[in-house]
Amino acid sequence: RKYFCHPTTNEKVTVFLDPCHSLKLLRNYLGEHKSIIDDNNDIIQWEYFSQLHDIQVKEGLHLDPTMNTGLRVQHIQYNKQKMKVKLAVQVFSASVGDALDICKSDLQFPACAESAATIRFIRINDLFDTLNSMSMKQMGFKKPLHKHALREGYTYLSQLRNTKDNQLLMYSKSKAVLGFMICIKSLTILYDDI
């Protein structure tokens, strides 16, 4: 259950885990284990973040406003700064996904040829935006009650697996997926009750 009844008023009290913490845990898991298998049996790889950073530096793409992701060494080698939410959010930002997609599709860098699953995974930031929104007036994925994004995110997360074919949801070392899924269900319950 994603809620409990208040002992005095008997009203539902919906439980949320911190989406910022879940995003950091997800980044930490991928960074430590190097790969995750998605629902299409494609491999999501941490290596693409390193390769994108290297490409940006070597090719001078970090100077191009359309390719500047803000991805720096501290995003790739984050171990001494694991608690900084900003670094995790920036790794999974739309600009990183877009830049990786440009390197794969438009510039056709061989190092990014198989990065489609990682690009799709980066879009988890859309789910984070939905769960971390602060105003009912925000638009797009920052809109707090974006039910389509919630359903899609829940299904996607529930099917992620580690390289030993264990669902990340059930894997004890990654509470990130469980945290996101609890938040999704809780927000849906809250939405339906309002």
Image (spheres, rainbow, N blue to C red):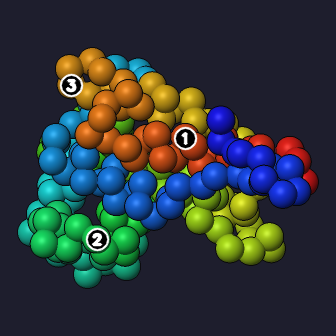
Mark toward the start of the polypeptide (2 vs 1): 2
Q: Which residue position holds label 1?
A: 181
Q: Quadrant of residue 168?
A: top left
Residue assigned mark 3: 163
What is the distance, in whole Å, between disc 2 and disc 1 at their CAs?
21 Å
**Which quadrant of the view contains residue 55?**
bottom left
**Cα–Cα span, label 3 and label 2:** 26 Å
Q: Amino acid at mark 2?
A: Met
* Residue nearest the observer in this picture, 17 or 3: 3
As helix, strand or loop, the secondary structure at mark 3 comes to loop
Quarter of the picture holding the C terminus: bottom right
Type of amino acid under label 3? Thr
Residue topped by disc 2: 83
Q: Residue at x 72, y 63 (%)?
A: 143
Q: Quadrant of residue 23?
A: bottom left
Q: Earlier in the sequence, mark 3 or mark 2?
A: 2
Front in this rendered view, residue 99 or 169: 169
Can residue 17 be spotted in the picture?
yes
Residue sitting at 77 percent across and 47 percent down? 5
Residue occupying the point 80% across, 73% down = 137
- The amino acid beneath tag 1 is Met
Q: Is 100 situated above or below 160?
A: below
